[in-house]
Image: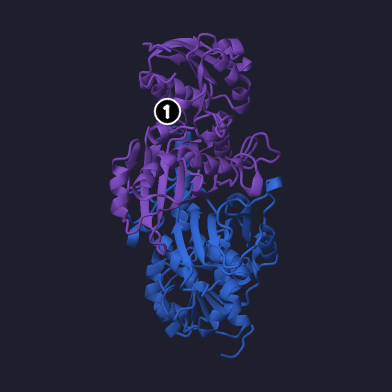
Chain colours: A purple, B blue
């Protein structure tokens, strides 16, 4: 394909928590947009969204929507991606998919540009955006792997409700108000909307994100395990995850234990690597109480790392605290970065 | 000392979050109380508290307060314990101290009755109640250690604000209301009242509990590390901790990774051990979305365990989710259990 100056873009799921951020990010990063199509379910058709100070009317996403589209950014749930991504590719679009539908498919690159941008080149029409909790972890660990080697990851997450969409955000607001008013909390959405049981998230912590699967792990946990290996190109990497939803609106935090290959590495060596890592900001000055938190990281582009410590017993074991906005780097920004890479490298 | 039918009890810090629960627990567990003294700082003197349907007037805690007291339950902060515990012992009382003042002292037993009740016998006047986050973890891990051996613990905590006292509870309430009203959140207490910087806890997660110490670890983290080894009588046990405060009022949760000594142990074997463990309730049926949460565990006596999984890569590695009310088993109940043990075993 010849290099163009601007591209026809479709955003699928344009009214959702991530879709809204994708539109903001296309504008903020000055993506060269020629025509913009904002697509969603039939239910949202006719609504308007804003982009670059213009109103755009939402159209229902159908196979025909993708005619003439160069890049389609999907963020409307796995079933929509499964139904329409291949239709978009058949019509000449390159799809950047923000759902889990194709992430582990062999012919689909799974990309965090700071980590494995080159993987985009071999795409066959679909590029997958990793799970939010995976993106921030591998973005912080890739420079560490390059510097010191990496053999093992054990992660416990502290995840925001916005990862479960707008209804989960509303549910946290409502339950919080119910509690402050002395009313019983009503739970209808979290931990997983489609599941039989729902539990309050306000003033609570739910050790279930997505449905349960093999070995007692949830799908969210398997995503972190399998996606990390794929993105880091290391099937032998040991990864275990415990994923927990918190009463936090935005930004996921992660308590991460790693084992590295190199001996005699000090915390200061980690700092040096993280200080110059792309897309990473080191916030680690315990004496001044400097460490990242979900609130301090919200609405920011970078992955923040603090609390770097050597394990008390294992000399090549280290603990880190990794925080990033799950809607920004964890979703919209990473998706748009992949789109930028496609056009910048002429990989469409 | 001759066996008595009832004992003179002093509760120091009787107006605080834990002190209030201690009074409730003495009553609920039918502790044989003869005379009750409710002590606190000068500021609280003259207030009244309830016990067994009677009002008791708070007196200022002074060395003389302990004359005639058989058992003094301290829960008014480390500085009060340091100032008054030895005074109480000199006057013939046995002290059960709920602060960190004496926990690691060689002559002071550090006790979770389900784990190491026998250690109480050798006390020299002071018995220490462990840190809340330590108690629930060792209560769940002791039966596992007995059955399968235990060589390593890596824990990430999800801790409630009530562990930081009444002011922290009030701060979470206030910040939550501020947020819902669209006002800026004011932070004056958490993460640590005496520290220079304070951060909002509402809709946030703070990776600092207590002040920072050696190696970039906080004191709370060192407490979990050192206290676990002491209670489990195993200086060679590897323990690492990351302690995080959440916008949760009551009950701490813990994501715990352990390595056991025995081979070929299955999740079902863990279930069998935990089902009959004293003070522990197994809540682990992923197919039915059954697992403990802070809200479901609040106001209960037991330590709840769920999400037991084998590590995907390490056959003797397992992950667990351990939840308990930090004011009940994590503080008041454990303290009162020690007092019961003292009188039941004639160890005063």
Please state if A327 lies on the left or on the right of A345 as rendered: right
Rendered location of residue B49, percent (x, y): 54, 64
- Chain of the residue under the numbered disc 1 shown in the image: A
Rendered location of residue A293, percent (x, y): 40, 43
Farthest residue to the front: give it. Answer: A122
Would you call the spot at circle 1 few (<14 residues within 10 Å), some (14-19), or many (20 or more)?
many
Q: Identify the element where label 1 is drawn.
A: helix
Q: Is residue A10 above or below residue B128?
A: above
Between B184 and B263, which is closer to the camera in this rendering? B263
State the quadrant of the N terminus of chain B.
bottom right
State the quadrant of the C terminus of chain B.
bottom right
Residue A239 appears in the figure: yes
Q: Which residue is mark 1?
A: A333
Rendered location of residue B259, percent (x, y): 54, 62
Q: Is residue A292 above or below residue A265?
A: above
Between A116 and B20, which is closer to the camera in this rendering? A116
Residue A248 appears in the figure: no
Q: Is residue A221 above or below residue B271?
A: above
Please state if A8 lies on the left or on the right of A90 as rendered: left
């Amino acid at each position: 394909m010849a290099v163009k100056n601007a591209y026809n873009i479709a955003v699928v799921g344009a009214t959702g928590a991530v879709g809204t951020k994708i539109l903001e990010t296309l504008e903020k990063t000055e993506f060269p947009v020629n025509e913009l199509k904002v697509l969603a379910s039939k239910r949202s058709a006719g609504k308007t969204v804003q982009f670059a100070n213009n109103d755009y009317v939402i159209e229902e996403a159908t196979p025909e929507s993708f005619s003439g589209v160069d890049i389609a950014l999907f963020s409307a749930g796995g079933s929509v991606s499964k139904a329409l991504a291949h239709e978009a590719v058949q019509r000449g679009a390159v799809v950047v998919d923000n759902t889990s539908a194709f992430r582990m498919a062999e012919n689909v690159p799974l990309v965090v540009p700071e980590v494995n941008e080159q993987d985009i080149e071999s795409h066959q029409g679909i590029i997958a955006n990793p799970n939010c909790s995976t993106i921030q972890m591998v973005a912080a660990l890739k420079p560490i792997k390059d510097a010191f080697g990496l053999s093992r990851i054990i992660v416990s997450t502290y995840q925001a409700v916005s990862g479960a969409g707008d209804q989960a955000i509303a549910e946290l607001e409502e339950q919080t108000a119910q509690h402050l008013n002395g009313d019983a909390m009503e739970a209808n959405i979290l931990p997983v909307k489609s599941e039989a049981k729902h539990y309050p998230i306000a003033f609570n912590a739910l050790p279930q994100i997505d449905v349960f699967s093999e070995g007692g792990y949830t799908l969210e946990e398997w995503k972190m395990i399998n996606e990390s290996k794929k993105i880091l190109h290391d099937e032998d990497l040991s990864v275990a995850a415990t994923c927990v939803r918190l009463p936090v609106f935005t930004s996921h935090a992660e308590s991460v234990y790693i084992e590295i290959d190199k001996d005699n590495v000090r915390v200061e060596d980690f700092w040096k690597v993280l200080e110059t890592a792309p897309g990473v900001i080191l916030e680690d000055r315990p004496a001044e109480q400097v460490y990242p938190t979900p609130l301090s990281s919200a609405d920011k582009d970078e992955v923040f790392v603090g609390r770097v410590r050597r394990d008390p017993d294992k000399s090549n074991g280290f603990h880190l605290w990794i925080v990033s906005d799950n809607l920004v780097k964890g979703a919209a920004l990473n998706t748009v970065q992949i789109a930028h890479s496609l056009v910048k490298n002429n990989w469409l």
